[in-house]
Amino acid sequence: MNAPNAAHEPLDARDRPARLTVGVVGAGRVGPALAAALRLAGHRPVAVSGVSDASVRRAAALLPDVPLVTPAEVLARAELVLMTVPDDALPGLVEGLAETGAVRPGQLIVHTSGRYGTRVLAPALRAGALPLALHPAMTFTGTSVDVQRLAGCSFGVTAPEELRLAAEALVIEMGGEPEWVAEESRPLYHAALALGANHLVTLVAQSMELLRTAGVEAPDRMLGPLLGAALDNALRSGDAALTGPVARGDAGTVAAHVAQLREHAPQAVAGYLAMARTTADRALAHGLLKPELAEELLEVLADGGSTDGGSTDGGSTDGPKGEDR
């Protein structure tokens, strides 16, 4: 039987897994949202565990009337258990629960870590559980908006071949789209997502701070259209979407940028230089940065922004550096 297509074919009753009781171990931002999405698909959340006040509040908001119990009790009540704890805590948690006999044969044990595949669930597998790694490629807020954002969200899925259909069905029921990731590729897959999403937040927050320092009253409104267009262009065209002074080889402008950052935001210099060097390397490799302009630019970046040549006011548009942005 072919896996159902989330974009074109709704699941019929034969493709849907049996309605399951669902438990959540770790009421962070992810677990309650996924359990709420499974509830919308007809499954029944029956237990959740959480320690912090924030976890208790999230569970109450997204899973009202679902009792807050210990992790072992979650496993005792649920047929499908979502292990939504921090990556570093997952191996010890799984091993501890398996050693104490909390894991039952035939129980679906699902973790949502991007870093790990199903190998981390080996202790549960030895106890007879069915292991799945379902990682939503989404940033979570811990509120009900997360359930809506799951619509069309890709999930990095790793599972034994015999559980492939079940894994795909669960992802589709949560509104997502399964993307298969090999066990050995999980760390690289997760690094790629962190590089894009986590660092993007840092870059945007830093950019807004600098704009405020420059006197811009509404940096979010200024950046919204610009960054939205840049993201769209990058997703469509990759490196061909590169623009700006680094891609043009404007060494003087880059030197001026670094000088201003050293004066007003020295904590931003290292990040600017690192990203500018990477951008220059990619622009040069893809033929966007002319070799005759790259040498001076790379010297500026190697010197940390100092340069003896060219204008540093960023205002000149004469000659080859005055190309369209």
Image (tube, helix red, strand yellow):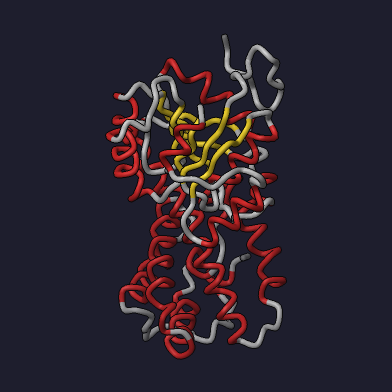
Query: Horizontally, is 120 left or right of 241 in the view?
Result: left
Q: Where residue 284 sits in the image (x, y, percent)?
A: 41, 57
Quadrant in the rendering for residue 291: bottom left
Q: Residue 227: x and y, percent?
A: 63, 62
Q: Is residue 138 above or below residue 100?
A: below
Q: Residue at x 48, y 60 (%)?
A: 52
Q: Is residue 85 above or below residue 269?
A: above
In front: 61, or 166? 61
Residue 184 in view: no
Task: Please identify the quarter of the rendering in which residue 46 is found.
Answer: top right
Give how far across and how far down residue 202 sits, in percent: 50, 67
Residue in view at x 58 percent, y 41 percent: 34
Q: Residue at x 65, y 88 (%)?
A: 215
Which sits in the foreground, 73 or 110? Answer: 73
Quarter in which the N terminus is drawn: top right
Which residue is farthest top? 1
Q: 118 or 43, which is in the foreground?
A: 43
Label count reads: 0
